[in-house]
Amino acid sequence: MPGDDSKLRILSTTDLSGIDIPLTDVVNVVEGAYRALADGTSVTPPKLTVKPADGRSVAYAMLGRDGTRAAVAVKTSYKHGLKEGRELQHYYTALTLYDDTTGLPIAMMDCGRIGALRTPAVSALLARECAAPAARTALVIGTGTQGRLALPFLLTTLPELDRLLLYGTHPDGIAAVRERLAAHFPDRALEVVTELRAAAADADIVLATAGPLTPAAVEADWLRPGTLCVLVGYGIRPSTLHRADRVIATSAAQMAVTGTDMADAHGRLPTVHAEFPQVIAGRASGRAGPRERIFAYNSGLVVTDIALGHRFAELAIARGLGTEVALWR
């Protein structure tokens, strides 16, 4: 990609919104990023976190290097108003990419769409590797950013799913989930559920993507043997983790930092049996038996943001999108 050592290309939300990328391509890019990490060609140190004592906000900084693309990047994320409704929250996330072959900057971009695609793709890969072989019913909890593409991505990796359940409390969010599902899989039906315990008991896969104010709180004893629980946001209780037969994490170190709300009364988290990059690479097992209850923690890794962000940057630059700023002049 072209570059200039005095200029930085800025790719806005609007720039990225016009770029179409198939769900299968997103899954392939994300899976490739995990394989490179497992092979040791990519590097992702633990994220840094800052959160004030009153819990009003949370900020993260993540540095990584994608060995496949020879790209280095820094991602920042800041959310304010954690105790407020979604409409009162402020959220900003950005990714800055550098070409580690030429030493030139590639782009700085809004990372909102990248995260909105990357995270459900990771959940779908977790489901592919860790769900029971006979899994047919998926329950998504939450209708925010991560909930809206959860089912299309699940169907991309597990097309044999035949019952799609949704629990949500925001009418606009429920409508958005319907719209996204219809756009990608127009022949598939959505069931909106109000009895969460009954829905959880029917589900083979429970994907918790809700915000911190959700009333949803699925307990371990609601689940049948063989259920996979994937935690992205909120909606399932710590018992689903502590009573799981097997725990998978995208990163055990990140789970220790960002998963403290799932700790037991003594502040402890269970042992992680396998990290997901090793599962993807076939060096660890996501599931040992059909009746195992699996808990999977999807905290996201910056190498997946780098890989997907790099692809978006390629497409955007080819179209002449973005604004070049003489930042270092």
Image (cartoon, rainbow, N blue to C red):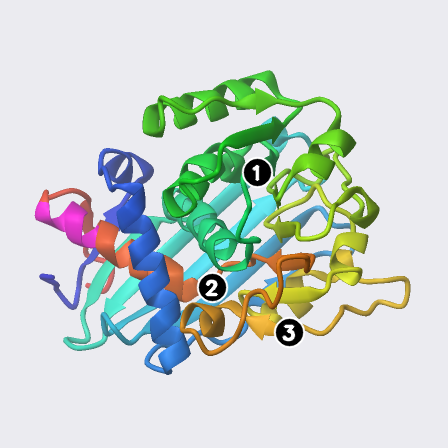
Q: Is residue 268 left or right of residue 265?
A: left
| Quadrant of residue 100 within the rendered picture | bottom left
Secondary element under disc 3, as helix, strand or loop, is: loop
Name the residue tied to disc 2: 301
Looking at the image, can residue 192 be seen? yes
Write the residue at 58% across / 65% down: 287
The reply to whether callout 1 and callout 2 are in contact (CB within 8 Å) is: no
- Quadrant into which the C terminus falls: bottom left
- Relative height, residue 36 to residue 177 (above, below): below
The residue shown at (34%, 24%) is 183
* Residue at the (67%, 30%) spot, across then down: 85
| Residue 129 percent coordinates (x, y) | 48, 59
Residue named by callout 3: 273
At numbered mark 1, what does the secondary structure look like: helix, strand or loop? strand
In the rendered image, residue 65, in percent from the top left (x then y), is placed at 34, 74
Overall secondary structure of the magenta stretch?
helix
In this picture, which residue range is highlighted in magenta? 313-318
Does 65 appear above or below 177? below
* Residue type of the residue flagged with mark 3: His
Amino acid identity at mark 1: Ala
Residue 94 is labelled as: none
| Amino acid marked by disc 2 | Leu
Q: Is residue 245 left or right of residue 147?
A: right
| 122 vs 160, nearest the viewer | 160
Mark number, residue 138:
1
In this rendering, does residue 9 appear at all? no
Which badge, 2 or 3, is on the more N-terminal residue? 3
Camera-nearest residue between 261 and 97: 261
Distance between mark 3 and mark 1 Cα atoms? 24 Å
Point out the frontmost of discs 2 and 3.
Answer: 3
Q: Earlier in the sequence, mark 3 or mark 1?
A: 1
Seen in the picture, residue 189 relative to 272 is either above or below; the reply is: above
